[in-house]
Image (cartoon, rainbow, N blue to C red):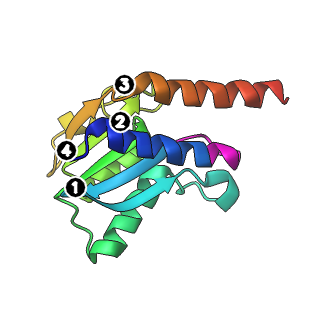
Amino acid sequence: MRTDESYMSLALELAREAAKLGEVPVGAVAVWDGEIVGTGFNRRETGKNALAHAELEAIDAACRKLGGWRLHRCDLYVTLEPCPMCAGAIVNARIRRVVFGARDPKAGCFGSVSDFAALPFNHRPEVVGGVLAEACAAELSAFFQRLRSCR
């Protein structure tokens, strides 16, 4: 049986793929009862699309694979605390559990700036933060350091 750390390690691998493309390194893995049903990483720059966040890619892939939008038995692993758009998608997709790595003090919506799981929506996912947080934060820091040094 896989652990939260092993799924987050997969999300980190996806984040590294994003970084290779010049994207902010965020990766996401959707897991339905232990089976990976969707993955994604940021593609906003390469796709020229504000909606191309890692979480939305993973949720979209899971919906396509499972043939429906209700992901009530799905856990989502993401290297960075989800933003408001992604938190809304998580709530609307009925994601059972959100596991994230690094906190996002600028846009995080599962405890940092806001907490969508505490609001009176019709669905409240379980939220676990801080899984492999140091590795996830280090990936983001290294990316932004490289970006600043190229300017």
- Residue at the far front: name it: 1
Q: How many marks?
A: 4
Q: Which residue is mark 3?
A: 112
Q: Earlier in the sequence, mark 2 or mark 1?
A: 1
Q: CA distance from mark 4 to mark 2?
A: 12 Å
In the rendered view, does 151 fall on the left or right side of 64?
Answer: right
Between marks 2 and 1 in the image, the one whose residue lies nearer the viewer: 1
- Numbered circle sitting on residue 100: 2
Residue drawn at x 40%, y 67% is 61
Q: Can you tell which quarter of the image residue 67 is in?
A: bottom left
In the rendered view, does 117 fall on the left or right side of 5?
Answer: left
Residue 106, visible in the rendered structure: no
Above or below, 69 against 89 in this view is below
Q: Which residue is mark 1?
A: 34
| Range covered by the magenta-colored residues | 18-26
Element class at badge 3: loop
Residue drawn at x 39%, y 31% is 101
Residue drawn at x 68%, y 52% is 45
Asked if the residue under mark 3 is in contact with the one under mark 2, i.e. CB atoms within 8 Å, the reply is: no
Q: CA distance from mark 2 to mark 1?
A: 17 Å
